[in-house]
Image (cartoon, rainbow, N blue to C red):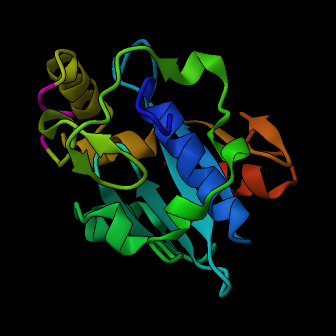
Amino acid sequence: MKNLKYGVLCGGAAWLCMKVYEENGYSSWTYHCGNPPESYITHVVTLVRDENNQYYLQDATVGLSIFLGGLDSDWRVSIYKNGTFLPVCKQLLIPANSLDQISDDAFMMPPKLQRKESCFKKIRTGVGLYTEGWCGPKVFNRHPWWPETEKFLEKKGLETVPLSLFLLPMAVFSTQDGYVTNAHDKNESSRLLRKFYL
């Protein structure tokens, strides 16, 4: 990762962002969303809880940061209201140089998240360098499966915008709980998963 021999897709970027937060004392998760095969597109982002028990959604792949609020907030409203594409590196809850001080262990992500052809080259968003075509709000609209996903969102009664993908929960992962797909468990990961259900 450090020498750019390998790149990652969204799952790897979200994993690394989670590890950065963990190493700085924050509780953090990866959030997996989409509804395959009907929504066609799936995505993985990072959730983080600050010292005031407020939550943030940070997409290290495309450079998106959303303030969600507390567990008593309506996160669906927050996503549409606060879903602006801002550089995640400017929205991190930790100093930017924390990325340079992260331990080597944090870079040891599962092999299935690695890709031999790196897309980390030009643009720094959250935790990586990306080619210009892979950051910003238009990345999903350029996806070859976006037209089918757009139709699915419309069928579900959701706005036909990429932000609606966050309202199709699949799983939450944390170092403590592992992968959680059951929103009715009593752990914090399940509570977070429930917040994204319609």
Residue at screen point 79% across, 46% down: 175
Q: Is residue 158 visible?
A: no
Residue at screen point 12% across, 27% down: 142
* Residue 151 sits in quarter: top left
Residue at screen point 59% across, 42% down: 15
Residue 53 at x, y percent in the picture? 67, 80
| 115 up-or-down from 81: above or below | above
* Nearer to me, 108 or 174: 108
Residue at screen point 29% across, 62% down: 80
| 184 up-or-down from 82: above or below | above
Query: Is residue 141 shown in magenta?
Result: yes
| 188 up-or-down from 108: above or below | below
Residue 34 at x, y percent in the picture? 44, 30
Q: Main secondary structure of the magenta part?
A: loop
* Residue 134 sits in quarter: top left
Query: Is residue 188 shown in magenta?
Result: no
Give the left or right position of residue 71, taking residue 95 as reference. Answer: right
- The part of the chain drawn in magenta is 138-142
Residue farthest bottom in this picture = 52
* Nearer to me, 55 or 115: 115
Residue 174 at x, y percent in the picture? 74, 47
Q: Is residue 81 visible?
A: yes
Residue 171 at x, y percent in the picture? 64, 36
